[in-house]
Amino acid sequence: VNDTTYIVIPAFHEERVIGAIVSELRAAWPRIVVVDDGSSDRTGEAARAAGATVLTHLVNRGQGAALQTGIAYALRRGAEYIVTFDSDGQHRAEDIPLLLEPLRSGAADVALGSRFLGTTEQMPARRRMLLRLAILFTRFASGVHFTDTHNGLRAFTRAAAARIELTMDRMAHASELLDQIVAARLRHVEVPVHVRYSDYSRAKGQRSSGAIRVLLDYVQGRWLR
Amino acid sequence: VAALTNFQIAALTLAACVLVAIAVQRARSRVSTRIALAWATLWIAAAIAVANPDLTRIVANFLGIARGADLVFYLAILGMFIGFFAVHLRLRRFEAELTKIVRELALRAPKEPGSGE
C-alpha cells in the first residue's frame, strides 16, 4: 500500500537537511518526490542521493508552484494517496500514517495536519500569534474554521488531489488550498500532528513581516484573475 | 498670437518628433492602428495644451481647479496609476505562464533516485 503513496516535498535551498529528511522517510515510504524549486545549492543532488525522485524547477516559482508540480507528477505516476511534507524538518514521519488512516478507511478525502490540535516544540510566541491571526482571517475570508491553516503536512486521496489546482505560486497557496477543498466539497478532517521548531527552521522559514505579502498575494489571486 | 516661449518651442518640437515616430512605426506595422491612434491622440492633446495654456486653465476652472498646470498634473498621476496597474496585471499573467512552462519542463525530466547521472 505504501507503494502507491507519494510523499511530495517542495524544497528551496535545503541542501543541509533534505538528505536526512528523505532518508528518514524512505524507511517507510518508497515514493518520495522532492521538487527542487530552483535552488542554486545542491538540494536536488542531496535529495536524489538520499533516494528521492527529483523534479527540478529551472527557476524559483514558490512553494505553491512546487507543490502543484509534485502533485501533478504523483497523479501521473498513479498515486493513490499523496502526502505533502515540509523540507525544513518541522514534521515527523510517524505522523503520516495518522493522516492516511481516515483516507484509507474512507472517512475523508483530505487530512490536514494541525499543530494546535497536536503539539509543538519551541514555537516562538510571535509565530503562534501570527498563525492564530491567519486562522481568524480564514474564518472571515473563507467562512470556514480550521484549527491550523498553514500546516504543510497534509494528505489527499487521488480523487481529491485531482480536484486541487494551486495557482497562487507563493505562500498564499495555503489559503487557496482550503478554499478549493471547501468549494469542491471534499470531506476533510484535521489530524493532530507534532511540529518542531529548530534554529534551522526558524531561520529558514517565513518571516512574520512576509505575512503582508502573503495577504496581498491571496487577495489578488482571489479577485484579480 | 503671442510669440512662443522657449519651453513651447521645445515641447512642440518633441511632440512633432514623437508623432512622426508613431507614424513611422505604424507604417512599418510595428504597432497596431489602435495603439498608434491612442498615442497620437495623447501627444496631439499635449501639443494643443502646450500651445494654448489658456485652454487647460478654462477646463481646470470649470472643474474647480485654479491652475491648468495642476489639472495636467493630476491627470498625469491618474494616467500613471492606470499604467502601473495594467503593467502589474500583465506581469501577473506572465508569471502564471512562466510557472506553467517551468512545471512542464520539470515534469518532463524527473531524475530518478540514485547518485550520479
Image (spheres, coloured by chain):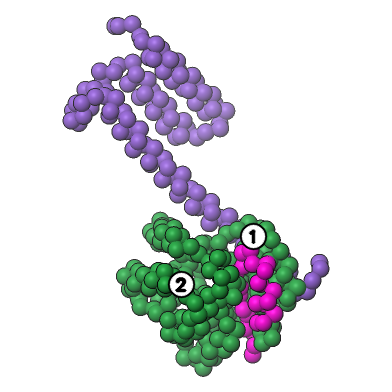
Chain colours: A green, B purple
Give the vertical position of A24 relative to B35 (above or below).
Answer: below
How far is the residue under mark 1 from the one under mark 2? 29 Å
Q: Is residue B51 left or right of residue A85?
A: left
Q: Which quadrant of the view contains residue A8?
A: bottom right
| Dot 1 crowding, Cα within 10 Å, few <14, some 14–19, many 20+ | many
- Secondary structure under tag 1 reads loop
Q: Is residue B38 left or right of residue A20?
A: left
Give the vertical position of A60 relative to A9 (above or below).
Answer: above
Return the chain for callout 2: A
Q: Is residue A109 visible?
A: no
Q: Which mark is residue A54?
A: none
Tag 2: residue type? Pro
Tag 1: residue type? Gly
Q: Which mark is residue A124?
A: 2
Marker count (numbered)? 2
Where is residue A95? Give x, y as percent: 55, 86
Query: Does the magenta portion include A74?
Result: no
Residue assigned mark 1? A38
Identify the magenta region.
Answer: A1-25
Which residue is depicted at the point 46% across and 85% down? A118
Which residue is depicted at the point 52% across and 28% down? B26
Q: Which quadrant of the view contains residue B12?
A: top left
